[in-house]
Image (tube, rainbow, N blue to C red):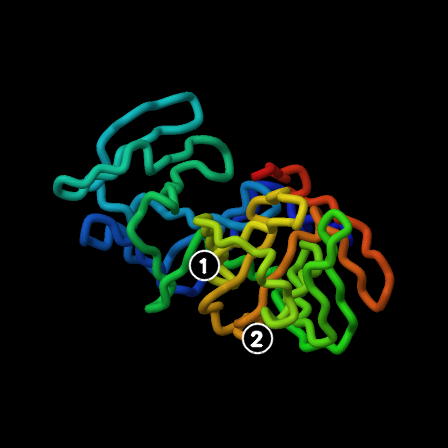
């Protein structure tokens, strides 16, 4: 995985032409065509709003520090504690950030978005491939295919999505874990149970109904490159460094 240098100083602020709406408690507490994309860190942007676009009637004072004023968002009998932050420092002065995860829904135009706004500087491409991909977990082959889908996402490792018939499904145990991605959708997970009894948790993920831009990964599953051995055309791939590299959980049953 190549190191990607963020091209702007932080925080970085850009306008967006999209209509942005935020739903909470059955009401749109924000409905604006004047939203801002703000990068507080390189990974992805957040939506920030001007005070004129967040009606004061929804904000109840919660806490104030030197640089931030926090508000609860209240609609009827619904309350999201400390969900709105008004900044009072330099570039962000007077702007409001609303906690994405505690709202009921976010919309760009009439399309619902998930997790965070999509980064306009990021690409996600899915390519059909005929490369020979094998996956081993602690020396046990768990997948073998010559028809993978390769998913390339800016600043992240290449992910090898393997058709489920080419995976040893008898070694997979359904997990209750789910995660969301703004580019791919809602992911479900599998544990891997080796013949030795070792159980490696949430090692595999798949998307039942992926977002349209990643529709080609439907029916496929991917393994964490950081935690398994992946061979491409017979060559063992180095395990990449990423935020997921250290979160390996294993147990015996």
Observer-nearest residue: 42 or 136? 136
Observer-nearest residue: 11 or 120? 120
Q: Secondary structure at mark 1?
A: strand
In the image, is 211 to the left or to the right of 24?
A: right
Position of the C terminus, as image quadrant, is top right
In the image, is 29 to the left or to the right of 227?
A: left
Determine the CA span between mark 1 and mark 2. Answer: 15 Å
Q: What percent of the width, then of the height, locates residue 163?
A: 61, 71
The residue at the point 57 percent across, 44 percent down is: 201
Q: Quadrant of residue 66?
A: top left
Q: What percent of the width, then of the height, locates residue 145?
A: 71, 71
Observer-nearest residue: 172 or 58? 172
Q: Secondary structure at mark 2?
A: helix
Q: Which residue position is annotated with label 1?
A: 186
In the image, is 37 to the left or to the right of 158?
A: left
- N-terminal of the two: label 1 or label 2? 1
The residue at the point 70 percent across, 47 percent down is: 227
Q: Which residue position is annotated with label 2?
A: 216
Classify 10 Å Cα crowding around label 2: few (below 14), some (14-19), many (20 and above).
some
Q: Quadrant of residue 131?
A: bottom right
Q: What percent of the width, then of the height, locates residue 156?
A: 67, 54
Answer above or below: position of 64 versus 211: above
Answer above or below: position of 220 versus 82: below
The residue at the point 31 percent across, 55 percent down is: 105
Classify 10 Å Cα crowding around label 1: few (below 14), some (14-19), many (20 and above).
some
Observer-nearest residue: 238 or 73? 238
Q: How many numbered discs? A: 2
Position of the N terminus, as image quadrant, is bottom right
């Amino acid at each position: 995985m190549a190191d990607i240098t963020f091209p702007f100083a932080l925080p970085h602020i850009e306008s967006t032409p999209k209509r942005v709406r935020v739903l909470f408690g059955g009401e749109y507490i924000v409905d604006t065509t004047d939203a801002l994309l703000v990068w507080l860190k390189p990974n992805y942007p957040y939506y920030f709003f001007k005070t004129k676009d967040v009606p004061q009637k929804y904000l109840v004072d919660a806490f104030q520090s030197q640089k931030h004023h926090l508000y609860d968002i209240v609609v009827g009998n619904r309350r999201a504690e400390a969900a709105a932050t008004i900044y009072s420092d330099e570039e962000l002065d007077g702007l409001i950030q609303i906690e994405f995860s505690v709202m009921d829904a976010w919309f760009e135009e009439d399309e619902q978005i998930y997790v965070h706004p999509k980064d306009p500087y990021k690409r996600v491409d899915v390519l059909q491939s005929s490369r020979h991909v094998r996956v081993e977990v602690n020396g046990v082959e768990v997948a073998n295919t010559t028809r993978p889908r390769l998913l390339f996402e800016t600043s992240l490792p290449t992910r090898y999505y393997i058709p489920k018939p080419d995976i040893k499904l008898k070694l997979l145990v359904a997990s209750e874990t789910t995660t969301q991605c703004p580019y791919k959708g809602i992911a479900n997970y599998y544990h891997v149970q080796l013949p030795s009894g070792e159980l490696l948790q949430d090692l595999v993920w798949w998307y039942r109904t992926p977002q349209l831009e990643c529709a080609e990964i439907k029916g496929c599953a991917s393994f964490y490159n950081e935690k398994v051995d992946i061979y491409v055309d017979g060559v063992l791939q180095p395990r990449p460094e990423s935020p997921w590299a250290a979160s390996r959980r294993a147990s015996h049953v």
